[in-house]
Image (cartoon, rainbow, N blue to C red):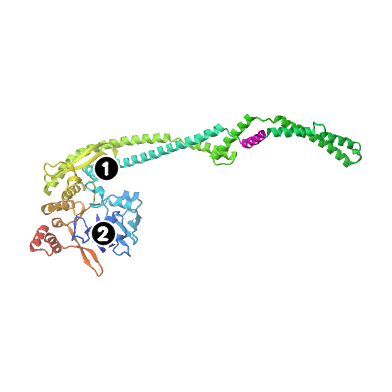
């Protein structure tokens, strides 16, 4: 239960320390006195976002702290899961600095707003704050029927399995997309690899073919020069070798006379032999060099292929191109086949889906059984609230596939008067009718949904007199098993309080501030009398107030 709420520097609250107990706590006050500000501060404790506009003094921090007794709520597993220190007295604190940034603490340990929300949703039902507990919400309507049906345990198991179901479906989608992209990349790489395989590149062939192309392109000149060299040296009227032979003959007769002359003669003979070899080589080259236009075209095409591949892969040599080919081959080898993993996930999804459907069938049967009980109980509770002709009808539509809460779509339909057709609550129920329905439904499900503290903000909207008195009786009865806090304008409801707090404003030197006071018996009489007749209250209103309190 909520034991204490401390607020400093929030909105028009300078400083406030509210002590709370079990039973029915009523909070009253004039419009604009700051009753809703208390709920705003409590909303911070429950994980709502805030900014610097809530600061009473803009140069000081805002501080909101709530103390709960959680000894009977079995929250040890939650604290263990979130790695938080468990204490039976839970202290939650929010601090908002002057820039609007806030920090949250659970038992003095920093925490996140998401963890704060998850924890406090198990502690407090703040009627006006949470859409999941809004009477119009499909989620709340479904939870209501499951609470009456006793489905909460199997629904929790279903929800856990459904979250796993959604998770593996997301994994499958990611895997399928990866597989698709991998296949696309493999197709592209395979196309490139096919180009390389068809090219059958060989290391060094580029330079070799460039040289051969240059030779064949100059074949006629090579033949001409080679033949010329041969003839000038070896085969002509007055060749170089003939000249060297004559000179050798002249030198041979006295070459032995001197070692230098002998060496010169040997060199002359050697030069003659070297020139003879040179002439033969030149002739051989000339003979073996033939202009072949077809061969030249083949060489050009081959080199064009190599140049094109080099340009395509942004490299400047055949060696680099062969490295690209090796890299593509390695990348192709690295691709694993995801088909097996996809098949495994699809099999698991099918298995989990079947399990979900089986659970959903069990849930549906218990819902079908509980719906008539719920409709009857709500009608019986509405009768004393001057809604004897009002009926709630629960429409349950089967879904084709598992959803977050089973395979049913549950809708609350409402007929407020005799002969009126059933329509969704949001389309037909007035504010007063919604207030009474909300109170009846929450009083039915409070135990099943384990809502320790229920806070109602003006649950009496649109009602007064005897109806308000009976709503007060329902709140009082509900407070036997739960801590109930109700902000109200109804004197009939206020009279049912175990504790009655009065919210009021008073002026300081430079501004107006809000304060809260616990009313004693005589003060309660005057306050309820004011609610009945105005300020100052009449003698009749005071007598009526005493009667209500008695």
Which of the 4 quarters of the picture holds residue 409? top left
Left of 342 or right of it: where is 400?
left
Left of 540 or right of it: where is 298?
right
| Above or below 80: residue 204 | above
Q: Is residue 446 magenta?
A: no
The quadrant of the rendering that contains the N terminus is bottom left
Which range is magenta?
Answer: 203-217
The answer to whether any part of residue 456 appears in the image is: yes
Q: Is the magenta stretch mostly helix, strand or loop?
A: helix
Question: 212 or 392, which is in the foreground?
Answer: 212
Of the residues tagged 2 and 1, which is closer to the observer? 2
| Above or below 38: residue 372 | above
Q: Outermost residue, left direction?
A: 540
For residue 153, the mark is 1
Q: Where is residue 435 in the image (x, y as percent from the top left)?
A: 17, 50
Question: 213 or 49, which is in the foreground?
Answer: 213
- Crowd rating for badge 2 (residues with CA inside 10 Å; few <14, some 14–19, many 20+): many
Q: Identify residue for label 2.
A: 5
Label 2 element class? strand
Q: Position of residue 415 (x, y in %)?
A: 15, 43
Q: Where is residue 89 in the image (x, y as percent from the top left)?
A: 28, 56
The alpha-carbon separation of the residues under discs 2 and 1 comes to 32 Å
The quadrant of the rendering that contains the C terminus is bottom left
Q: Residue at x 45, y 36 (%)?
A: 184
């Amino acid at each position: 239960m909520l034991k204490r709420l401390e607020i400093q520097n929030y909105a028009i609250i300078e400083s406030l320390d509210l002590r709370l107990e079990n039973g029915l706590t009523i909070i009253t006050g004039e419009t604009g006195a700051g009753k809703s500000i208390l709920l705003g501060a409590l909303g911070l404790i429950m994980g709502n976002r805030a900014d610097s506009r809530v600061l009473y003094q803009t140069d000081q921090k805002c501080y909101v702290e709530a103390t709960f007794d959680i000894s009977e709520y079995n929250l040890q597993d939650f604290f263990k899961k979130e790695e938080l220190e468990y204490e039976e007295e839970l202290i939650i604190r929010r601090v908002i600095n002057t820039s609007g940034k806030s920090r949250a603490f659970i038992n003095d340990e920093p925490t996140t707003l998401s963890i704060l929300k998850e924890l406090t949703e198990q502690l407090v039902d703040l009627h006006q704050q949470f859409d999941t507990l809004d009477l119009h919400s499909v989620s709340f309507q479904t939870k209501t029927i499951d609470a009456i049906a006793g489905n909460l345990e199997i629904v929790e198991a279903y929800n856990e399995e459904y979250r796993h179901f959604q998770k593996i479906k997301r994994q499958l989608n990611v895997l399928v997309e990866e597989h698709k992209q991998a296949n696309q990349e493999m197709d592209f790489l395979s196309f490139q690899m096919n180009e390389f395989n068809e090219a059958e590149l060989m290391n060094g062939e580029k330079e070799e073919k460039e040289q051969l192309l240059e030779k064949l392109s100059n074949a006629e000149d090579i033949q001409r020069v080679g033949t010329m060299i041969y003839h000038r040296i070896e085969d002509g009227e007055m060749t170089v070798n003939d000249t060297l032979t004559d000179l050798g003959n002249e030198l041979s007769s006295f070459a032995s006379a001197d070692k230098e002359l002998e060496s010169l003669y040997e060199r002359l003979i050697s030069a003659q032999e070297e020139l003879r070899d040179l002439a033969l080589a030149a002739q051989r080259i000339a003979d073996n060099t033939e202009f072949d236009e077809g061969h030249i075209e083949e060489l050009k095409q081959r080199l064009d292929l190599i140049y094109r591949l080099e340009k395509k892969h942004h490299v400047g040599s055949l060696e680099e191109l062969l490295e690209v080919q090796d890299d593509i081959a390695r990348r192709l080898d690295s691709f694993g086949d995801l088909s097996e993993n996809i098949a495994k996930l699809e099999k698991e999804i099918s298995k989990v889906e079947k399990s979900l459907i089986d659970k959903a069938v069990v849930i549906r049967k218990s819902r079908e059984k509980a719906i008539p009980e719920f409709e009857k109980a709500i009608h019986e509770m509405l009768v004393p609230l001057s809604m004897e002709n009002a009926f709630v009808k629960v429409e349950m539509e089967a879904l084709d596939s598992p959803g977050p809460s089973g395979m049913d779509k549950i809708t609350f339909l409402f007929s407020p008067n005799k002969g009126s057709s059933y329509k969704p609550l949001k389309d037909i129920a007035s504010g007063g009718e919604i207030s009474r329905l909300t109170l009846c439904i929450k009083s039915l499900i409070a135990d099943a949904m384990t809502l320790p503290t229920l806070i109602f903000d003006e649950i009496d909207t649109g009602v007064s007199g005897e109806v308000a008195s009976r709503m007060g009786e329902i709140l009082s009865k509900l407070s036997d098993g739960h801590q109930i806090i109700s902000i109200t304008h109804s004197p009939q409801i206020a009279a049912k309080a175990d504790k009655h707090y009065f919210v009021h404003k008073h002026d300081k030197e430079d501004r107006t501030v809000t304060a809260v006071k616990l009313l004693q018996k005589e003060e309660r009489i005057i306050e309820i009398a004011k609610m009945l007749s105005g300020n100052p209250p009449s003698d009749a209103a005071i007598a009526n107030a005493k009667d209500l309190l008695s």
